[in-house]
Amino acid sequence: MLLSNFGVYSVSIDHNGIHNNVDPSIEFSGKLSSLKDSGDLKISKIFHCEGLILCTTKGNTRLVIWNSSTGETQRIKPKTRYRYEDYYALGYINSKSSGHSLKILRSCCYENGQEQWVAEFEIYEFSSDSWRVLDYFTRDYGVFCSDRSLKGNTYWVAGDKETGMFMLYFDFTTERFGRFPLPFTSFNPEDTASLSVVREEKLSVLHQKILDFSNEMKIWLTNKISETIELSWSNFVLTVDYDKFDLPSVVNVTSFLLDEENKVAVCSDIDMDDEDRTRVYVVGEDIYKQVYKDTTKTSYFNWPLLINYVPSLVHIKKNTLKRQKKRKSREVR
């Protein structure tokens, strides 16, 4: 799935023969348009969790939970008001007895009328159709990438002046934040960092030193992550030196999907030398193949996002979400 230029698209990327001189290809199944008024709706951010998509519109004027497979939607009203600075995460309680209980985390950091910085955290529970305030958190860190959800919990790359960059996570069961060390050290807030989920069981992290005008990108991979959130890093490292490919500018990856077996990544970014158009390409240690370039000029502030999407059987009915019996579904990217 690809978020680009305020639209969400179902895409499939075939790169299986890339090591045998077979060019990769991309197929657009179409723009996902089951949201009401989707023809005029500009989607600025998406937050994905096991087949459900939480969408915010341009300017954070609307918040909608969406199952693109069934077409079901539910608009989420704010506790007080939407803010431009609002950021969300979608997850659920891990419970064998009660199953998955879906929640939304809202975080917001803004400057009030007294020129003071205010941090707000709230939880929305679908079971009660209500928000409640989490008043025991402070915001003493910055977040450097879009979130990724795995086994009901949400992960980011964050950082502060004392420790540099680290893995931040939110446990929707305990409603607490936690931290893990990253496999690299960085105190530079201008560095590029991004996360991706691999086969719904691992996380991978990407790092680039953009201000050093380095064209080297590295990707690391965790071992399998369970519901208990025990995280460790494997020996897998993919290093790509973009200078090998004689590209006209420094590459700044916004999102990626890792193929661990073939040791390649599908990456997205914007081409700042071509009116900030979205581009998608497959890259490895000795491979660079562009598979898509948008024909429409986009905004520098509307960066593309690639995610793995698996169709969901969760039904959205007013304020209740029910899970049907699982059946195998092919993965859609």
Image: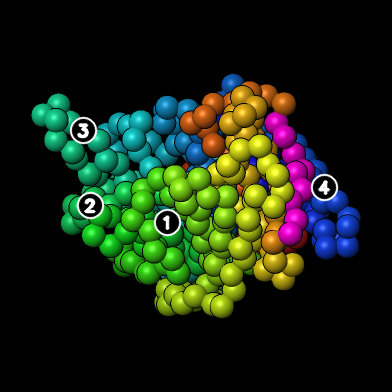
Residue topped by disc 2: 140
Closer to the chain start, of discs 1 and 4, is 4
- Image quarter for residue 159? bottom left
Quote the CA–CA distance across marks 2 and 1. Answer: 15 Å
Q: What secondary structure is marked by label 4?
A: strand
Nearer to me, 143 or 93 = 143
Quote the CA–CA distance across marks 3 and 4. Answer: 46 Å
Residue 302 in picture, x, y percent from top left: 52, 32
Please provide the residue range marked out in magenta: 286-294
Three-letter code, disc 1: Trp
Three-letter code, disc 2: Asp
Closer to the chain start, of discs 2 and 1, is 2
Left or right: residue 182 versus residue 23 is: left
- Above or below for 202 versus 195: below
Three-letter code, disc 3: Glu
Residue topped by disc 1: 156
Tag of residue 25: 4
Density class for disc 1 (Cα within 10 Å; few <14, some 14-19, many ≥20) is: many
Nearer to me, 157 or 74 = 157
